[in-house]
Amino acid sequence: MPKHSVELIISELKSKEILSQFTKEELEILDKEMKEIHYEKGQEIIHEGYKPTGIYGMLHGTAKLYRSGFNGKEQILRFVKKGDIVGYRSLLGGETFSASCTVLDDVTVVYIPEIIFHKLLEVSSKVSFDVLKKISQDLGEAGKTITLLAQKTVRERLAEILLLLENKLGIDNEGFIKISLTREEMANLIGTATESAIRLISEFKTDGLIEVEGRRIKILGHRKLTRLGHVTL
């Protein structure tokens, strides 16, 4: 089974072959600055507009990546979970963070300083290829988001988003999608007003497509949602 990005990075940073190519100063930075950090729900991991000093690897939990619009309204870009890395694109591009990342449930990350990440890309073909693949996947997701918002109705967008969330984040023991979103966050995801999102979720529930328990949602009609959203997962 292939390793997730974070698992691969940690594994390579324990490899004697890889570490033998680090300078004494780089090894000291690795020892002193690479660390695990715990965040509670609502805390920020990165903030839009700030300069990155390293990357963050998700060891546990879920967070959302989003941008703030001119009116202060959030536009959720995607969700990150265990195994994902955050902040790498801005770091590699020499830019400030283009989005913020806020914790949705308790999260543990591993912080990897910029100099260590850059060195690892130089000496580990495995990590370099994995990051390149990750960038390609993110670009693909961005393209799908543009198509989703531009060409589909709000009802179709909700159907697709629910299926994508389940596919990406998984379900708990009761079958509910492993994420708790407010109705406002759901509205931001599908690009509509909160009132419209509330009405659509209620309609989906009435139609037997989903089960709703507070903020939790369980998909009951996968085939119907797939047809409704014209989804290919």
Image (cartoon, grey):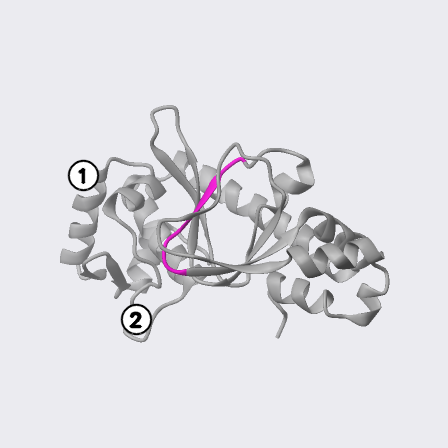
Residue 207 picture location, percent across and down: 16, 57
Position of 62 with respect to 199 (left or right) is right
Identify the residue at horizontal 62%, vertical 69% (top origin): 3
The segment highlighted magenta reads: 98-106
Nearest the camera: 102 or 79?
102
Read off the residue under disc 2. Answer: 175
Identify the residue at horizontal 64%, vertical 58% (top origin): 34
Image vertical order of residue 226 relative to residue 220, above or below: above
- Spatial CA span between label 1 and label 2: 26 Å
Magenta stretch: includes residue 105: yes
SS at badge 1: helix
Q: Determine whether label 1 and label 2 are within 8 Å by CB.
A: no
Mark linked to residue 46: none
SS at badge 2: loop
Read off the residue under disc 1. Answer: 195
Marks 1 and 2, the one that precedes in the sequence: 2
Nearest the camera: 77 or 25?
25
Residue type for callout 1: Glu
